[in-house]
Image (tube, rainbow, N blue to C red):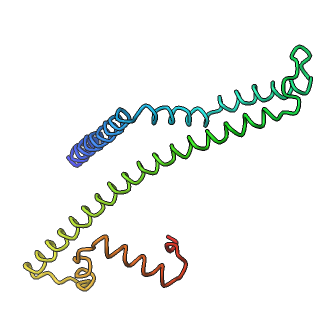
Amino acid sequence: MSSSISDRQVRRTAKRLDRNIEALLKRREQEARQSTMQERAVDAITRFAGSLMFVYLHLLIFGFWIMANLDLLPFVPAFDPSLVILAMVASVEAIFISTFVLISQNRMAEADDKRADLNLQICLLAEHEVTTLLTLAAAIADKLGVEIETKAELEELKEEVTPEAVLDEIEEKVKRRGAGKPPPT
């Protein structure tokens, strides 16, 4: 009997988990569909620039360029003997690739901020629900005349915690330390 209850709980949990995963995947697909052509192009360029194929291609092109201009390939005439053009091409490419990477990182940071906001909202909701349950459990204990040894701690836990108060406390402690950065976790 205990095993079947456990199996049922596992199935319910798996269904909830599957539903949540599906919702997240649908959301990502929706956001991908809503991205502009420019954003998709930047993402594709960044993905390619971060691949081994990009490295191999550059090894091949730059290796050929250098060997040809050092007269190591007799069938190819030197076209940039001082390698100044190669340096200019590599510099311009680096400028564009670093810009594409920064654009992608900005979009990733924006997505991370959304996930952090969602996580904060879920945590605040869970904290509120736990506080409500503690208050209810304390009221039931009082009604039944059950003595609670950690009454002071329970009273403290029953208090609502606001995000503003937590942020203010963090900022105050950072100021007192004079470090200008949050305390280590």
171 left or right, relative to 124: right
Residue 16 x, y percent position in the rendering = 25, 44
Q: Is residue 177 above or below residue 86?
A: below
Residue 19 x, y percent position in the rendering = 26, 40
176 left or right, relative to 121: right
Q: Out of 173 and 138, give the one closest to the viewer.
A: 173
Q: Is residue 179 above or below residue 111?
A: below
Q: Residue at x 20, y 72 (%)?
A: 134
133 left or right, relative to 143: right
Query: Residue 27, located in which quarter of the rendered image?
Result: top left
Q: Out of 170 and 75, give the one closest to the viewer.
A: 75
Q: Out of 68 and 127, give the one closest to the viewer.
A: 68
Q: Is residue 57 above or below residue 95?
A: above
Q: Is residue 5 above or below residue 181?
A: above
Q: Residue at x 51, y 44 (%)?
A: 103
Q: Out of 94 and 120, give the one closest to the viewer.
A: 94
- Count of all numbered marks drawn on residues in the image: 0
Q: Residue at x 20, y 82 (%)?
A: 148
Query: Residue 149, located in which quarter of the rendered image?
Result: bottom left
Residue 82 x, y percent position in the rendering = 88, 33
Q: Residue at x 72, y 30 (%)?
A: 58
Query: Residue 128, located in which quarter of the rendered image?
Result: bottom left
Residue 66 x, y percent position in the rendering = 84, 29
Which residue is the extreme one toward the left? 143
110 left or right, relative to 66: left
